[in-house]
Structures are given as structure tokens and as C-alpha cells.
Image (cartoon, helix red, strand yellow):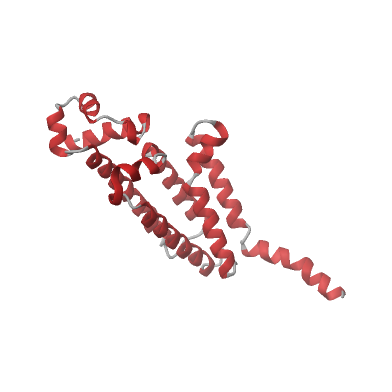
């Protein structure tokens, strides 16, 4: 591992342990076993260090977004992509739980609204793909609602765990969230929609 990658690994540990706003560059240099000047050569400011960590996280997001564009996407594959995304998010939890702090520290360099918009677009495209592949049956307004519910749940799953249990445990919380997502998708599964229509059709025939 080169010096830059080593610094980032130590910095990520510190961010996850202390929070993005609480890290001290000099302490990270000490933990990394290098002189503060050596760290400053790679990352002149704390903000540069945090920006580099965000870039690492963004590359993982790219893999998630690219996976959602699979032309053969089905619910199982979509949930597996979310599982991988949750694991990656947990690895950067110190950043993601401190979004407001990051916005204050990085200013315009941290545009979370752009990430959110991109996520909504990709989720809507993924739901369109599920419907085209016969795994979903929903109107346009229902898909928008489903997209927003999925986005809300997946964006705040760690906050939800903290609020419910007081801590975050991936082995407990990720399966719990995946079960919730599967339940949301199943509401619009073609077989469920058919089952819901049958009582209505029988009632209409008896009128």
C-alpha cells in the first residue's frame, strides 16, 4: 500500500471512530506513522482528506448505479446490489452520518443534492427495467411513490438503526432493511396485483 492509500485508510478509521468534524490531521499522521509534513504533501488540508474519502465512496456508488442498469435486472439482483451498497456505506459511516458537518466543512465541493437526484433517476430507471422484465406492475404514480420509499429507506438505514437500537450492526440491520425493500417490491409484483383484482372481478360479476 502506497503512502497516500495508507493515509486514507487511517483517516477513514478515524472518521468512522470520531466523526468527520472531529478528526485532527496531526493525529492521523501520528497513527499513520508519518511526519505531519509528509501527510500535508498528499493532503494540504483536512478538507482535502475528506474530499478524497468521499471520492472513494463515490466510486463504490458508481458500481451500484451501474449494476442497476443491468438489462436483465430482477428483484433478487436489485436486492443484492443494495446489500453490497449497504456494506460499502457502513464502511464510510463516519462520513455518511455527518452529512451536515461535511456540507459545512466542504461547502460547494460537497453537493449532496446532486447525489440524491442521481439516485432518484437511477432508481426510477431500475423500476422501469423491472416492469419491462415482467417483475413489476405499477402505474407511473405508483412507481414514483415506490421510488421515493426505496430512496428514503436506503438513504437513512443507518440512522434508522441508531434510532431503533442505539447502534449499527450490519449483520442485524442489513437483512432487516433488505426484508423491508423486498416487501415494498412485492406490493407491486404482477402475481399480487392479479390476486388483488380477483375479488373485485368476482364482486362485479355478482352485481
Specify the farthest residue to the right: 207
36 over 46 or under it: above or below: above
Q: Quadrant of the C terminus?
A: bottom right
Along the line of sight, the residue nearer the viewer: 46 or 197: 46
Q: Is residue 64 above or below residue 141?
A: above
Q: Is residue 17 left or right of residue 124?
A: left
Residue 47 is situated, as x and y percent measured from the top left of the image, at 25, 41
Query: How many marks can you see?
Result: 0
Q: In the image shown, does 159 or 89 lie closer to the viewer?
A: 159
Quarter of the rendering containing residue 93: top left
Q: Position of residue 56 (x, y in %)?
A: 29, 45
Residue 2 seen: no
Residue drawn at (12%, 37%) of the image: 41
Kindly tell me whether residue 90 is visible in this rendering: yes
Q: Classify the position of the N terminus by image quarter.
A: top left
In the displayed structure image, the side of residue 29 where residue 170 appears, left or right: right
- The quarter of the picture where residue 119 lies is bottom left
Give the residue displayed 35% in from the left and 53% down from the top: 63
Q: In the figure, is residue 66 to the left or right of 10?
A: right
Q: In the rendering, at what x and y percent does residue 81 appear?
A: 44, 51
Q: Residue at x 30, y 45 (%)?
A: 54
- The image shows residue 198 at horizontal and vertical percentages of 76, 67
User: Which residue appears at 50% of the width and 35% of the height?
Assistant: 171
Amino acid at each position: 500500500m502506497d503512502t497516500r492509500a495508507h493515509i486514507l485508510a487511517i483517516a477513514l478509521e478515524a472518521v468512522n471512530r470520531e466523526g468527520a468534524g472531529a478528526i485532527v490531521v496531526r493525529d492521523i499522521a501520528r497513527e499513520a506513522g508519518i511526519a505531519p509534513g509528509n501527510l500535508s504533501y498528499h493532503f494540504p488540508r483536512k478538507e482535502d482528506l475528506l474530499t478524497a474519502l468521499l471520492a472513494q465512496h463515490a466510486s463504490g456508488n458508481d458500481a451500484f448505479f451501474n449494476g442497476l442498469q443491468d438489462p436483465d435486472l430482477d428483484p433478487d439482483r436489485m436486492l443484492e446490489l443494495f446489500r453490497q451498497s449497504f456494506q460499502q456505506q457502513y464502511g464510510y459511516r463516519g462520513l455518511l452520518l455527518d452529512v451536515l458537518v461535511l456540507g459545512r466543512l466542504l461547502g460547494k465541493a460537497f453537493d449532496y443534492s446532486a447525489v440524491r437526484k442521481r439516485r432518484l433517476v437511477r432508481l426510477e430507471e431500475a423500476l422501469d427495467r423491472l416492469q419491462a422484465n415482467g417483475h413489476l406492475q405499477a402505474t407511473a404514480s405508483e412507481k414514483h411513490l415506490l421510488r421515493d420509499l426505496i430512496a428514503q429507506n436506503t438513504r437513512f438505514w443507518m440512522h434508522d438503526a441508531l434510532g431503533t437500537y442505539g447502534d449499527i450492526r450490519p449483520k442485524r440491520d442489513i437483512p432487516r432493511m433488505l426484508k423491508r425493500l423486498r416487501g415494498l417490491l412485492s406490493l407491486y409484483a404482477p402475481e399480487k396485483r392479479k390476486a388483488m383484482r380477483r375479488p373485485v372481478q368476482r364482486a362485479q360479476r355478482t352485481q
